[in-house]
Image (cartoon, rainbow, N blue to C red):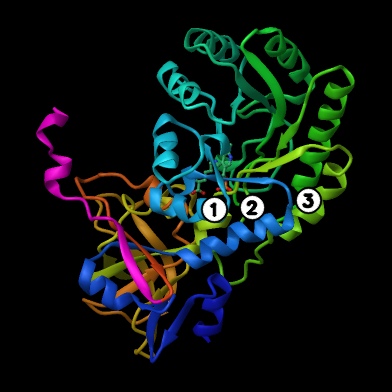
């Protein structure tokens, strides 16, 4: 039963003789060799997802959102399929460059870019800055002037659309800190166009994340294309429209995951009104179901009214359940026991909010067993921390039956590095 369900998460995930494999690599072998907690990502899955975007949006530029997973080797795989990068910090810019992304395919959004970050990005001659406030355009113009380079900007507008997702990751509502309100956006376009080092070339929006119903995109893109149309009529040289990321993925067995094709179908009627280069910024839908987190059961504790399975991965390794109450499907790596229990699967961190699953029906697990937490390729390692002085996990990339460690497990020496003081 579990076997056919797994394929819906990731076609490269399956049980062979009761043992879990990703792209032909045994996850229990990996855990034995590299230890746990361990993030494992499937390269072929990432490749297919980037290709699916290009098939759905021919002629577009797919800028993989590095925030979802900033491992340079993960970025490299997306880049090999033609992806650029969407970044939100100087650190992400360096990861994208390390992953081999051409600066001419990098777009940079973010409400709080520092002078140093802007300087770095201007110096590297990235494709475009998605500016989010009036003050930002003056700082950017000043930096461009000093460095002696022209920069391309898109203005991020807030189309005031409800993406029907978790409130922490809804970004396109009027009350959010992102972008400028679409009704007043023209004013900022005019001010930016008057600055001598900026070329205003596009309109950007990103309405939110983990969006399972594509209709809010249709509404947002329709408003954004109206604005582009207006701006072009007024003489602005608008050449591109960046419709952001946010396409949701399957986390629960019953979730229906929209495809890039579904998204294209919803927005194409609006995009086809104008001849604009389309930019997309998918993160989760490229890497989310490419990856999983392997953890080992440390202890099982039955309190009578409650059964706890305590594993060696905590909220410092995967924080999504703790902060968004997010559901992640969990399966045993060795599927041998026939019995099920209802348990809380929790980590070793000193907080009640440290859990991976609550009241979950799962195989009866024992000390030493391994679990796989699915859909953990996006916002897993990238949100990991050292809380409780726990070294961050190792990361492995698998492809066609072989694997490569793409980040070693951190050591105490690394955390306590003397030059940190
Ligand atoms: N573009 C911009 C401007 C963004 O802010 C984001 C995500 C993306 C693209 C990519 O969105 P995606 O395709 O991955 O949904 N930590 C949260 C998600 C935060 C998303 C932030 N912005 C989570 O774990 O659900």
Asked if one can make out residue 330 in the rendered structure from this viewpoint, the answer is yes
Q: Secondary structure at mark 3?
A: helix
Mark 1 residue CB less than 8 A from any atom of ligand 1: yes
Residue 300 to residue 41: above or below: below
Q: Which mark is residue 215?
A: 3
- Up the image or down, 58 lies above or below 41; here it is above
Name the side, left or right, on which 271 lies relative to 294. right
Q: Secondary structure at mark 2?
A: loop
Residue at numbered disc 1: 284
Which segment did they paint magenta?
Answer: 401-421
Residue under label 2, please give it: 247
Q: Residue at x 71, y 14 (%)?
A: 188
Where residue 272 sits, quadrant-wise, is top right
- Label 2 crowd bin: few (<14), some (14–19), many (20+), radius 10 Å: many
Q: Nearer the viewer, residue 145 or 378?
A: 145
The mark nearer the N terminus, 2 or 1, is: 2
- Dot 1 lies on which element? helix
């Amino acid at each position: 039963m579990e076997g056919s369900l797994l394929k819906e998460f990731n076609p490269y995930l399956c049980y062979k003789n009761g043992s879990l494999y990703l792209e032909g690599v045994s996850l229990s072998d990996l855990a034995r060799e590299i230890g746990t907690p361990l993030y494992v990502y499937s390269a072929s899955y990432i490749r297919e997802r980037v290709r699916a975007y290009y098939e759905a949006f021919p002629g577009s530029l797919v800028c993989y959102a590095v925030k979802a997973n900033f491992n340079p080797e993960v970025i490299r795989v997306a880049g090999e399929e033609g992806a650029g990068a969407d970044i939100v910090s100087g650190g992400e810019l360096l990861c994208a460059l390390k992953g081999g992304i051409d600066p001419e395919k990098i777009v940079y959004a973010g409400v709080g870019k520092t002078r140093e970050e802007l300087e770095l990005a201007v110096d590297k001659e990235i494709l475009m800055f998605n500016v989010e406030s009036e003050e930002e355009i003056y700082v950017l113009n000043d930096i461009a002037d000093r460095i002696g380079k022209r920069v391309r900007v898109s203005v991020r507008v807030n189309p005031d659309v409800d993406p029907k997702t978790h409130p922490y990751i809804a970004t396109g509502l009027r009350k959010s800190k992102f972008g400028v309100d679409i009704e007043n956006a023209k004013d900022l376009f005019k001010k930016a166009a008057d600055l001598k080092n900026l070329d205003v070339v596009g309109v950007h929006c990103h309405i939110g994340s983990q969006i399972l119903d594509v209709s809010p995109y249709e509404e947002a893109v329709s408003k954004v294309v109206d604005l582009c149309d207006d701006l072009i009529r007024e003489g602005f040289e608008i050449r591109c429209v960046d419709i952001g990321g946010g396409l949701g993925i399957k986390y629960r067995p019953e979730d229906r995951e929209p495809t890039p094709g579904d998204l294209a179908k919803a927005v194409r009627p609006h995009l086809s009104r104008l001849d604009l280069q389309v930019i997309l910024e998918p993160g989760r839908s490229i890497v989310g179901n490419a990856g999983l987190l392997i953890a080992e059961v440390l202890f099982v504790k039955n309190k009578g009214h409650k059964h706890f399975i305590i594993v060696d991965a905590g909220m410092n390794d995967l924080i999504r359940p703790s902060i968004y109450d997010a559901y992640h499907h969990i399966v045993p790596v060795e599927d041998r026991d026939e019995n099920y229990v209802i348990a809380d699967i929790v980590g070793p961190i000193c907080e009640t909010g440290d859990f991976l699953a609550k009241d979950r029906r799962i195989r009866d697990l024992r000390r030493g067993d391994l679990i796989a937490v699915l859909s953990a390729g996006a916002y897993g390692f990238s949100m990991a921390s050292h809380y409780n002085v726990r070294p961050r996990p190792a990361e492995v990339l698998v492809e066609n039956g072989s694997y490569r460690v793409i980040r070693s497990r951190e050591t105490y020496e690394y955390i306590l590095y003397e030059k940190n003081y």
